[in-house]
Amino acid sequence: MSNLSTTSDDILASARTLIMNGGYNGFSYADISEIVGIRKASIHHHFPSKVDLVRELVKRYREDGQASVAVLEQKVPNALDILKAYANHWAACIEDSSRPYCVCAMLASELPSLPPEVAKEVTAFFDFISSWLTSVMERGTNEGALNLTSAPHVEAETFLATVYGAMLSARAYGKPEVFPMILEPALNRLTPTVSH
Amino acid sequence: MSNLSTTSDDILASARTLIMNGGYNGFSYADISEIVGIRKASIHHHFPSKVDLVRELVKRYREDGQASVAVLEQKVPNALDILKAYANHWAACIEDSSRPYCVCAMLASELPSLPPEVAKEVTAFFDFISSWLTSVMERGTNEGALNLTSAPHVEAETFLATVYGAMLSARAYGKPEVFPMILEPALNRLTPTVSH
DNA sequence: CTTTGTCTACCTTCTAGTAGGCAGACGGTC
DNA sequence: GACCGTCTGCCTACTAGAAGGTAGACAAAG
C-alpha cells in the first residue's frame, strides 16, 4: 500500500475543513500552515496561489464524488436505495461532525464573489450531481423502484434542494437531527406503494 | 413622510448587498466606504466595530421579516396562499436579481466561523421563520387549506429547506428559473385535492 | 457650549505572494 | 563506488497592500 499522505494532500485536506467552516474568504495560508505544521512559503511551493489551491481542491472533490457514485451504482442496484445511501452519507457526516457541510454548497453560496476559475469548478460540480440524480430518477421510475410525481429532472432538483436545504437548517439550528427529520418524509414520498 | 434615508441606513443597505454576495468575510469597511461615499472612519462613528454593524443588520432583517409576516397574515387569510406569497417573494427577488439570496442563509452557512454575537442573531432569525411556518402549517391543516402528510413542524422544516435549497441551486446554476421549477411541485403537494 | 457627523492621519495586524538559500534525493557518467 | 548536476521540498526573510480600528481636529446645528 503506497497510501502515504503527501504534504500537498495534507494541505488540501486542511483547506477543505477550513472552507467547510468559513468559506473561501474565511481562511488563509497562515491557518493551513498551523494545521499542517509547515511554513506559509512552503504552501506556495505546492500551490502558487490561493486560486490554484481551491481550484484543485474542488476539482478533486468532484472527481472523488464521481468515483464514489460509480462504486455506489455498482454495489446498489435499486434506485431508491441509492438515494437513501446518498442521504445517509450526509446524515452520518453531519451527525459525527466530521464533514458537517458540503464544500461546494459553501462555495456556491459565495459564487458571485469567487474568482472565476474557482466558480467554474463549483458550477461543474453541481452539473455533475444534477445529471447523476436525474439519471437515478429516470432509471428508478422505469424500473418501478421510484414513485415520481414530476419529470425526472424536476424530481432530481427537488431532491438536491431538499438535501442541501436540510444541511443548511441542521447547521443554522445547530441540531444534526433536523437533517434526517427532513429527509425521511422526502424519501417516503419517492417510495412506491408496495401493497394496494 | 420622514422617510429620508439616513447615512446609517445607507451603510446597512450596502452591507446587506455585500453580505448577500460574499458573506461576512467577503466585504470590508473600505467596500462600504466606496458605495456610500464616506470615509472608513465615519462608518466607525455609526458602527464602532464590524460585529456591531452586522449584528444590527441581522437584527433589523429579522424585525423587518416579522413585520412583513404580520402584514401578510392580515391581508391573506388562506394558509396555502401565504406559502405561495412567501415563495413568490423569493422568486421575484431571484428573478430580477435585486436580492437574489437571503442574508441569513449566507450567514448561516458561515455560522461556525462567525463572531458569536452575530451567530446568535442568525440563529434567532431561523427560529423565527421556523416557528412562523409551523404555525401556518398548523392553521392550514385545521382549516383544510393545506394537505399535510407529516407533522406540521416537519412540513415547516421541509418547506423551509426546499426554499433555501432552491435558492442555492438557482445561484449555483446561475439559472433563476430553477427556483420556481422546484417550488411549484412542492406547493402542489401541499394543495388539498378539490374534487374527489 | 455641547453634540453630531465628518474628515485626515495614523496604527497594528493580517493578507497573499516573492526572493533566495540550503539540504537531501535522484540519475547518470567516469 | 565516487563524482556531479539537477530537482524537490522546505526554510528564513521580506514586500506591498488591505484589514479593522483609533486619535484628534473641524464645522455645523441645537
Image (cartoon, coloured by chain):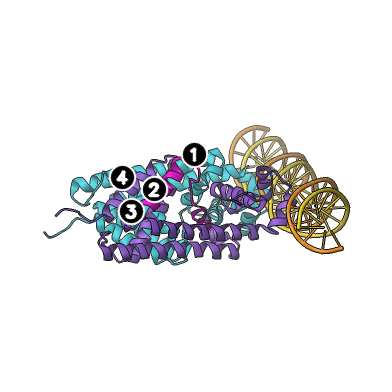
Chain colours: A cyan, B purple, C orange, D yellow
Query: Dot 4 corresponds to which residue?
Result: A154
Which is nearer the eye, C6 or A145?
Answer: C6
Alpha-carbon span between mark 4 and mark 1: 23 Å
Residues marked 2 and 4 touching at CB (< 8 Å): no
Q: Earlier in the sequence, mark 2 or mark 3?
A: 3
Q: Nearer the viewer, mark 2 or mark 4?
A: 2
Label 4 CA crowd tier, 10 Å (few <14, some 14–19, many 20+): many
Q: Nearer the viewer, mark 3 or mark 1?
A: 3
Mark 2 belongs to which amino acid? Answer: Asn
Q: Is residue A173 visible from the viewing direction of this image?
A: yes
Label 2 CA crowd tier, 10 Å (few <14, some 14–19, many 20+): some
Mark 3 belongs to which amino acid? Answer: Asp
Which is nearer the eye, B63 or A83?
Answer: B63
Instruction: Indicate whether A137 appears above or below B158.
Output: above
Q: Position of residue A5 (x, y in %)?
A: 52, 54
Q: Is residue A5 visible from the viewing direction of this image?
A: no
Left or right: B126, with B10 as reference point: left
